[in-house]
Amino acid sequence: MSVLERAALTTDAKAKLLQDTLAAEPAAEAAVLGTCNRIELYAEVDKFHAGVAELSTLLALHSGVALEELTPHLYVHYEDRAVHHLFSVACGLDSMVVGEGQILGQIKDALGLGQELHTAGRNLNDLFQQALRVGKRAHSETGIDKAGQSLVTFGLAELTRVTGELPGKRALVVGAGSMSSLAAATLARAGVSELVVANRTLERAERLAQSLGGRAVPFSAVPHELAAADVVVSCTGATGLVLDAETVTAALAQRAAAGPLGLLDLAMPRDVDGAVHELPGAHLVDIEDLAAASADAPMAADVDAVRRIVAAEVTAFGAAQRAARITPTVVALRTMAADVVSAELARLDGRLPDLDDKERAEITQTVRRVVDKLLHAPTVRVKQLAGEPGGAGYADALRELFDLDPQAVAAVSRADSVGTQDSNRGKK
């Protein structure tokens, strides 16, 4: 069993990993993305090296793979490189089947879990939301989704090279999750003569089978249905094998001259025993086979177009983030200016008590207009400068020049963060 299979995380394990990551001192935000060929932990950390060490240890702990065994397989990206990586993943550039669109749903799920557990704050929320937009843009503006098929479509195409075309075949789908549901729908559209759905929760199997005109069976019936099937697709969340070599061997013995049995394993960790590859009469296509088969697909022009989109979006995202970091300083500056204006107007009221309401209103408006005009150009320009590479120092310069209270700036940042989290909860 590969390291990736052994390291695959259940939903509960992901939740626990996120909670422990946030409890770790270097991390302020966290989100975990798990797909068939990746487990990625995104975190906002104050100390890079300490953060990498701590998060690597936590990933090893919750995956059950020893750190010394896991370390050679780890990769680390930070700042703009991390943004570039996630945007590339969202566009399907880093998928086993280039351009497959299912990754967008997985990124959305990762963000949703982070929001539900309150581990994804403003920074990761902005990052993942933008990644989703970039992925959608890549699919709408290029042919990447046509060049690279979904795992299900691509996998079935690989399978039918040996088993023959799908119309008239008897199909068994093991599992009733999103990937299994997609496989079942694809098989139904392809014209299989019979569609059988098996799941540990029979009610879910019944709902899926009924929607596609198929038949549902309990999980215990899988060995029996296996012998009657021509094509099998398995994608469950099981941590152990669903179809071992012995079970498949028994099914093959009952099939006699019924033709080859095709099995498509889309699960990670795997559902079907890798030893099935060696069984006469069986043809197994699994995740590793799909990775090798899709490597040579002709899609260079679309890939290049998507890479240009990613590069442009990373630049724009970085500029927006850098500009956003100076916003609390600008707000604190304007708040201080407003307080000065209010104090001076109060002094004026004490010195000139005989002013009527019209005169007082005119003076108030004039003073505020003067202050606004004086602050407009520098605050607009400092936001532009802060958005450029190396522009982080402008916020410090503004605080120093106007002697702004650091606590006032921090208070604006905290209020903005709380407002963002409240907004996120409101959208769910």
Image (cartoon, rainbow, N blue to C red):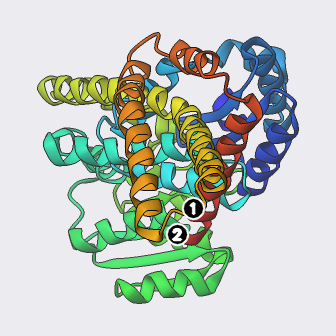
| Residue 283 appears in the rendering | no
Residue sitting at 81 percent across and 29 percent down? 60
Residue receiving disc 2:
427
Residue sitting at 73 percent across and 15 percent down? 71
Q: Nearer the viewer, residue 318 or 249?
A: 318
Q: Is residue 289 above or below residue 295?
A: below
Evaluate if marks 2 and 1 touch, with contact meaning CB atoms under 8 Å apart: yes
Q: Secondary structure at mark 1?
A: helix
Q: Is residue 360 above or below residue 23?
A: below
Residue sitting at 28 percent across and 78 percent down? 193
State the image quarter where residue 78 is shown.
top right
Q: Characterize the local packing of mark 2: few (<14), some (14-19) or many (20 or more) Cα atoms within 10 angstroms.
A: few
Residue sitting at 34 percent across and 47 percent down? 133
Does residue 38 appear to the left or right of 26 in the view shown? left
Position in image of residue 267 (x %, y %): 56, 49
Q: As shown in the figure, which amino acid type bears the numbered disc 1?
A: Asn
Q: Is residue 389 above or below residue 105?
A: above
Q: Which dot marks residue 31?
A: none
Q: Residue furthest front?
A: 354
Q: As shown in the figure, which amino acid type bears the numbered disc 2?
A: Lys
Residue receiving disc 1:
424
Position in image of residue 241 (x %, y %): 69, 51
